[in-house]
Image (spheres, helix red, strand yellow):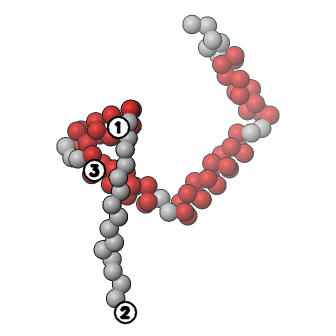
Amino acid sequence: MTVSTSTVVNVHIQLVGDEARRIHKAAQQRGTTVDAVVEDAIRTYLAFDSESVEWSVGSLSSFQEGLDNDEDAIYDDWRRLYDTDKG
């Protein structure tokens, strides 16, 4: 049995506005093509397997539980507490 490891996927995407400018700028800064930046972004996205996503969601939940208590509740209204609305 032979398993092929050379699967190719061709994708056409169209970005407009801010996203298009950001991708173009990233390519210029890296001295590469827009296609290379998009390929790198997809590889980075795919590198996050479901296990690492589950771990990070779980840790965020635990972090939130640690902050959700009466002792820290005073900081929930930090704008009023630090009077930041006065400019």
Residues under labels 1 and 2: Cα distance?
44 Å
Q: Earlier in the sequence, mark 3 or mark 1?
A: 1
Left or right of 29, for residue 3: right
Give the residue pinned by disc 1.
20
- Above or below for 36 versus 6: above
Q: Which mark is residue 1?
A: 2
Instruction: Farthest residue to the left: give it.
Output: 31
On the picture, is 31 further left or further right than 81?
left
Crowding near the residue tagged with mark 3, few <14, some 14–19, many ≥20 C-alpha atoms within 10 Å: few
What amino acid does circle 1 point to?
Answer: Ala
Question: Which residue shows up at 80% across the image and 34% down it?
Answer: 70
Q: Secondary structure at mark 3?
A: helix
SS at circle 2? loop
SS type, badge 1: helix
Residue indicated by mark 3: 35
Residue type at mark 3: give it.
Asp
Q: Where is residue 17 drawn, in percent x and y?
A: 38, 32
Would residue 19 appear left or right of 65 to someone viewing this image? left
Q: Residues within 10 Å of mark 2 (few under 14, many from 20)?
A: few
Q: How many marks?
A: 3
